Image (cartoon, rainbow, N blue to C red):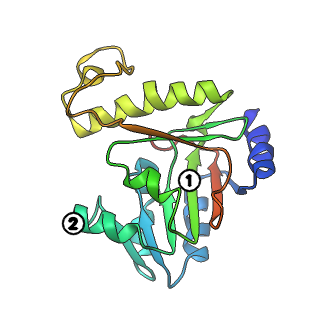
Amino acid sequence: MIFETAVKNLRTAGFSVQVFDTGAEAAAWLNQQIDGRTVGIGGSATVKELGLYDLLKTHNSVFWHWEQEQDEARLNAMKTDIYLSSANALAETGEIVNIDGRGNRVSATLFGHQKVIFLIGQNKLTKTYEDAVWRARNVAAPKRAKQFKVNTPCVASETERCFNCKSPERVCRAMVTLWGPMMGSETEVLLIREDLGL
């Protein structure tokens, strides 16, 4: 199973790693770990499915543009102690791949926080880095475009894939790969043995 190899390679790259059997266990653990802090959240179906906003806001200052005024929440999330995100793909070899439309999520995972935490379901795991890039572009990005109901070829097509379009409504405008934690910031990966997110 690639799960164990991914854990080994993430740790070798310098990431902290926690493994959970269920999303509920991961959410409960994280809710205990984060207390009295400022927390930013990126656009993440995984975070939504885990109910983390409602859990954390009872004892932390939490900023999430899916639940608050979008522009203000995005800016406030950039200045928090902790930033939560998922990933579009995770390679067994240890690379974390994310695609973004506005840039707030990918930029926040790179700079400005004491700690970045990735919550990644088993459906995001791939064998190779090339597979991870393919998944991010041809699975996660079209699903997000359909969720946002934009007018792009990946939404209009019956085949769910990236057409590398130049549409003004394109939601995949930047792709970032983390090979390791950024200098000056702790990065933790919570791997969950359930399918979560897009």
From the viewer's perspective, is 175 left or right of 10? left
Q: Amino acid at mark 2?
A: Glu
From the viewer's perspective, is 149 left or right of 132? left
Q: Nearer the viewer, residue 32 or 64?
A: 64
Q: Is residue 195 above or below residue 117?
A: above
Q: Image quadrant for the C terminus?
A: top left
Mark 1 is surrounded, within 10 Å at the Cα level, by few (under 14), some (14 to 19) or many (20 or more) other residues, namely many
The residue labelled by disc 1 is: 119
**Residue 192 tag number:** none
Q: How many numbered marks, from 0 up? A: 2
Residue 145, percent from left and from top: 29, 34
Of callouts 1 and 2, the N-terminal one:
2
Residue 141, percent from left and from top: 39, 33
Q: Nearer the viewer, mark 1 or mark 2?
A: 2
Q: Is residue 49 visible?
A: no
Query: Is the residue under label 2 in contact with that under label 1 (CB below 8 Å)?
Result: no
Q: Secondary structure at mark 1?
A: strand
User: In percent of the image, x 68 and y 50: which residue is there?
Assistant: 180
**Residue 69 tag number:** 2
Q: Nearer the viewer, residue 51 or 98?
A: 98
Mark 2 is surrounded, within 10 Å at the Cα level, by few (under 14), some (14 to 19) or many (20 or more) other residues, namely few
Q: Amino acid at mark 1?
A: Leu
Examine the image and state in which quarter residue 61 appears. Answer: bottom left
